[in-house]
Amino acid sequence: MATRARASAEQEPAARFEAVRRLSRDIAAPLSDADATIQPMPDASPAKWHLAHTTWFFETFVLRDHVDWYRPFDERYAYLFNSYYEGEGERQDRPKRGMLSRPSLAELLDYRRHVDEALLRALPQLPEQAVELLELGLNHEQQHQELMLMDMLAAFAENPLLPAVWQTPGSTAAPLPEPVQWIENRSGIHRIGHEGPGFAFDCEGPGHEVLLRPHALADRLVTNGEWLSFIEDGGYTQPALWLSDGWARVREQEVEAPLYWIRSDAGWSRFGLDGLKPVNAAEPVCHISYYEADAFARWAGARLPTEAEWEAAASESDPAGGNQLDRAGPVRPTGSGEMFGDVWQWTMSAFLPHPGFEPAQGTVGEYNGKFMCGQMVLKGASCATPRGHSRASYRNFFYPHQRWQFAGLRLARDL
């Protein structure tokens, strides 16, 4: 469960840096070296790779490029822990990151300490460009904190013992939410995209005008209980509800429920970072693909919102509100009722450049722009998103078939 204790963007740079870096270590703290090494699928990465890659980012783009006296901890690490930056040369193949049994988790924690100490020493003299890269690196690490939790869950779900990463006491079922209320959203010309002060990733801008047709958004997220009704009504067996590619995947992979749901004689359970628990009908549904979200919306007589509709509706909401990540632990959606938090929300919008988009200069310009093909935008924040990381203009993106992220949906309809 989230609390409000968080490292905010208003902290002094050194304190903010230490707080963000500490949270990553805390997330990995329950893991053995073996836990931190396994890679459950090509899309995921081992926990210790996340710990090292985020460190390599600071070492490379801040220390190497802007601090004359700094020397690399181990020059071989550049090959191991570069992710996809072509400008930084060759690298370990992504599907083979789980083969890196060495360096050990302990050695990579030493690597983190080495880089942290050097960066804190250099911080008072960093030039403005390096300070901007430091802020990019902190937001990058926050993204990887969520990825760590996603990938840890995926890894532990492969274990037949279904072990919990964090043990939690049993909880009573929350009361079911009230029926959905439809909130008429603004229509006409509206500006979306990031503009003005404050950090944002390059893909969030520039600000631009969009035309919004009359529409309404649901006042809350779709729940597990509503998803159970979709299942019981044959939602996964009716091809008329599905996009062609989605239906093909449902058939080929025998999908019959959200990822991590398990059916038994006692009913449906879901596996989480806190182990196997009964599905709570009141909680927002999670770990669904774009195809599943789209099929459910069609079954419900509604649709998914566009990115612009969602952003316009959220423009006056608190992006730090709702159920978001404040400390390491077994995150899960709980149904906070806010625009932000619990789950990332699928939209019907493709991840494409905003009009006038220009990628950042240099190698870090590879961060977003080259992925603007074949992926869909998700808005908001999830229970695994570090509080304070997101904003209305934030553009998360995944391929439509992917389900291991903390993703759900909010319905929309035309008026």
Image (cartoon, helix red, strand yellow):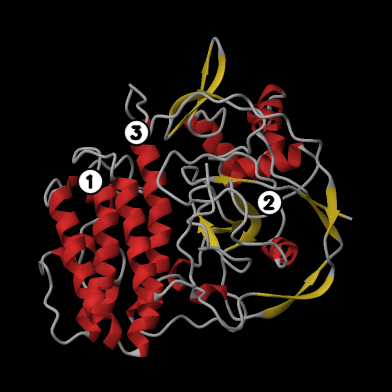
First in sequence, mark 2 or 1: give its number.
1
Q: Amino acid at mark 2?
A: Glu
Local crowd size for mark 3, using a 10 Å CA cut-off: few (<14), some (14–19), many (≥20): many
Could you tell me which secondary element the residue under label 2 belongs to? loop
Marks 2 and 1, how far apart in space?
A: 37 Å
Label drawn at residue 156: 3
Q: Name the quadrant containing residue 24.
A: bottom left
Q: Between residue 62 and residue 6, name the one nearer to us.
A: 6
Could you tell me which secondary element the residue under label 3 belongs to? helix
Residue 350, percent from left and from top: 60, 62
Q: Name the quadrant containing residue 278.
A: top right
- Please say if the residues under marks 3 and 2 sit with CB atoms less than 8 Å apart: no
- Please say if the residues under marks 3 and 1 sit with CB atoms less than 8 Å apart: no
Residue annotated with mark 1: 98
Q: Amino acid at mark 3?
A: Phe
> Relative to residue 243, is residue 115 drawn left or right?
left
Q: Amino acid at mark 1?
A: Gly
